Every structure is written in structure tokens, then in C-alpha cells.
Amino acid sequence: MKRGIFFGAGATFLVMALMACEKFLDTKPNDSLSTIETIEELTRLLNNTDIMNSAFPVLQEGGTDNVYVLPEAWAALTNIAAKNFYIWNDDIFGDSDFNEWSCLYEMIYYANVVLEKLPDVDGDLSQKNLLKGRALFFRAFAHYEAAQIFAPVYDPMIDNSMSKGIPIRTTADVSATIEWADLEKTYVHIKHDVMEALELLPDLAEHKTDPSKQAAFALLARICLAMSDYESAKDFASRALAIQDDLLDYSELDPASNYPIAIGNKEVIFHAATFGRPILNLANGRIDTGLYSKYEDNDYRKEIFFRDRGGTYSFKGSYTGSSVLFSGLTTAELYLVLSECEVRLGNVIESLSYINPLLEKRFDGSFTSIDTPDAESLLVIILEERRKELVFRGLRWMDLKRLNLDVRFQKVITRELFGNTYVLLPQSEKYVVPAPRLVYAVD
């Protein structure tokens, strides 16, 4: 599939992403390895935006406090995984062999094919190094996404080598036996891949679907934040913004538009879209009423992000310019990472220097800059703004997991459906989604 296919209609984009993942499951990928003989063919593998940029997971957002579904809509869902995730069922995927796991490990497979074949093809060294850097980035991003769903949260206060991580695949041989890494090794490998990619990638990429040095720094900032490593997250976010720090001015957007935010806009560092789940689509997904109420009337996001559905609100603020949800990397996310890390490290003035410029681009002229000298109060504000800014990107699940390590921010989430009450407690085992049955059957 040619580069740029995701710039088409949202529905077409979604179908292509789903077909790509399903096709992967219906074939034996190793059969195609012998046909790759040129660097151009390897380049086409990584340019396949259907696989490498279009199938990131967002199912986890459906299990968070950002979302609710009307009981009748939930009952009518035919997508078992979405239905199960919403109530944190013990079995999410049932007998399905198409799921978040399969799409992420397909991305990893493509990256591994490139990494294994590169030494055997002719080509300029600089071109080979660029492809290697891109493949390492994609492999790391996919492993990281899998860890957020299928592994426990990284807790810096314990020995994470005693916790189960995910399988780290570094071979394109799908028949090879891969042991599950512990959580410490999982994160060590993910970070190592990105650090190696850093040395091989340009500062900025020609296409926002391609990894860049800035994207690698931004990904490292996200990874380190998930690990509660605030010093490192701060460092990597700073280095990313040193390359480019543009923010969208939301006053220039049209809130009456069906999808007000353009794809590939100047905030986007790396474009990644999700293949979606019906629980989050325009027909079913609704923004939590408590969260919606936190958007003030002078906050442009209130109209740019949400569509009134007769007293309930669906999401229209994706950075894909369509109904397809975005999960890529942006400068705005980095401003929030830096603001949070600075205040956690005791640097209130520095923290304010990141949160205020962001909010000035989100509110109208009546906005009053935050000037609290109290670090704890400021942290609460920043975490609330992070939730509001990054809604429907699949990041809230990771945030709930890491914030639940701190008693100040622990959250109990409940669902009420047809007289039944479902509860997700802080640090519940349900925050670790069981791998699909097929994975264990193969093992």
C-alpha cells in the first residue's frame, strides 16, 4: 500500500487497517522473506502506512473514566472485545484472532524483516542507516504500546524484574520460540531500540508518517513518564522541543467543522492512527460528563473537541482530520510532560513556563495565566489539563496505571449497566489485559 493512504476518508482508512491485520493472520509471513532482494523493497515495507501507522491500539481508552456508553448502545455492540473491555471482563478477546496484539506484533514483524534483510541488500550506507533507524523506532513503539495494555505498570519503588512483561520479538522467524521478558527487561529493550534509532534518524522527517530524531526523543519522553522517571522524561522532552516547538492556535480553528483539526498539522511530530473500536466511535462513545464539565466556556477545546448529541457529547477533535482516532506524538504532549516533570522535581516556575504557553493557545483572550506557587496544587492542575488535552488518544489508560501508584491520585471507576455494577479499583489486576487465547495456544 502506498505512502499517504491514511489521508483518505476515515472509513476507508479504518477498513484498510483492519484488512491488513487480518491478512497477516491468514498467511505465513516467512514465505515472503525470500522474495525481498532490494533496498527499495525494504523501504516499501516501512512505507506501508496501513501497517506501520494505521493500526495502533485505542481499545484501552474504552476502559477509562474518559468514556461512557449508553446502556442500549452497549447492549447492541457486536464487537466482543470492545464490549468486554468496557466492563473490564476477565476475558477480553474470546476466540478472536484479530486484536490489538496481532496488529502490534505485525508491525514488529515488518520491522524485524527490515533489520534482518538490510545487511544482505545493496545500497548506500546512509540509506541503510536511515532504514535501520526507522525500523528500530517502529519496533520500539509497538513493543511499548503492547506493554501498556498487556503488562503491569512500571513501579520505580519495586524490583520490576519480578513482574511479567511482554514477549520481545527481535527475529522475523515467526516460528521461533520467544520467552516472555520480565518487566525490567521489557523496558530496557524498548529504550535501547529508541536510543539506537536516535543516532540514525534525521532531526525532522520529510513525511510525518516517518520516524525522526524529534519523534524518538518524544517517544522516549512518553516511555520514561510511564516509568515515573521524571528526570529522564524531562530531558528527552526538552531535547525534542529544542528541534521544533510549534503549537496550534485553537482560536484559528473552525469549531463548526465536522473535524476541525487538520491531519499532519504543525503540532504533529509523528503521525500514528488507530484502527478503532466501535465503543469509541461517533455513534457509541460519549465523553464522561464529569470530564466534559471541566472544559470552561472560554476553552476552545469544548467546541473543537466535542459534538453535541442532544445532551451527550461525542468526540470530533482527532488529529487525523477524520473520525479515526489519533495516537501519535505531538509538541503539545511534550509541553505537558515537561510541565508535569518540572513540578514533580520541585521547579514550579519552570513548570509554569510550559503549561501557560500551551493553555494560551487553547483559551480565548479572557484566559488568566496560572500563577500558583504551590507545587501540589499546580500538579493537580497539570494532570487535569493533560487529561483534557490528550482525551481519546489511548493515553489515559497508561496515566491511570501510573497515577494509581500514588494514593493522592488513585481512582475508582464504576459502570452501571442494566442493574449490574462493575468496578475497576486502583492497581487492580484488570489493568493487565490477558493476552489473546491464541497466543497461549501457540506457546
Image (spheres, helix red, strand yellow):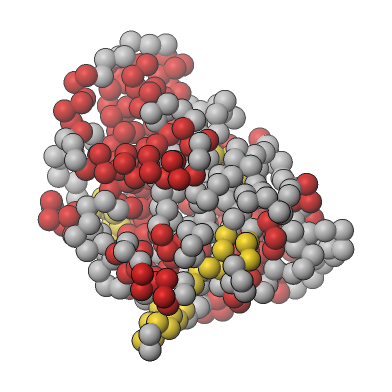
**Which residue is painted at 67% across and 50% down in the image?**
257
**Which residue is painted at 38% across and 44% down in the image?**
15
Relative placement, left or right, of 27 versus 255 is left
**Which residue is painted at 82% across and 58% down in the image?**
364
Residue 37, x across and y down, in percent: 26, 15
Residue 182, x across and y down, in percent: 28, 57
| Rendered image quadrant of residue 356 | bottom right
Q: Is residue 331 visible?
A: no
Residue 395, x across and y down, in percent: 50, 58
Relative vertical location of residue 348 with respect to residue 132 in this rendering, above or below: below
How many numbered discs sit on the rendered protein?
0
Quadrant of image for the N terminus: top left
Q: Residue furthest bottom?
A: 419
Q: Residue furthest front?
A: 310
Relative placement, left or right, of 21 versus 199 is left
Residue 419, x across and y down, in percent: 38, 89
Relative vertical location of residue 408 with respect to residue 353 in this rendering, above or below: below
Of residues 418 and 269, the one drawn nearer to the viewer in this rendering: 418
Q: Residue furthest right?
A: 366
Q: Is residue 186 visible?
A: yes
Of residues 336 and 90, the one drawn nearer to the viewer in this rendering: 90
**Which residue is painted at 70% across and 41% down in the image?**
245
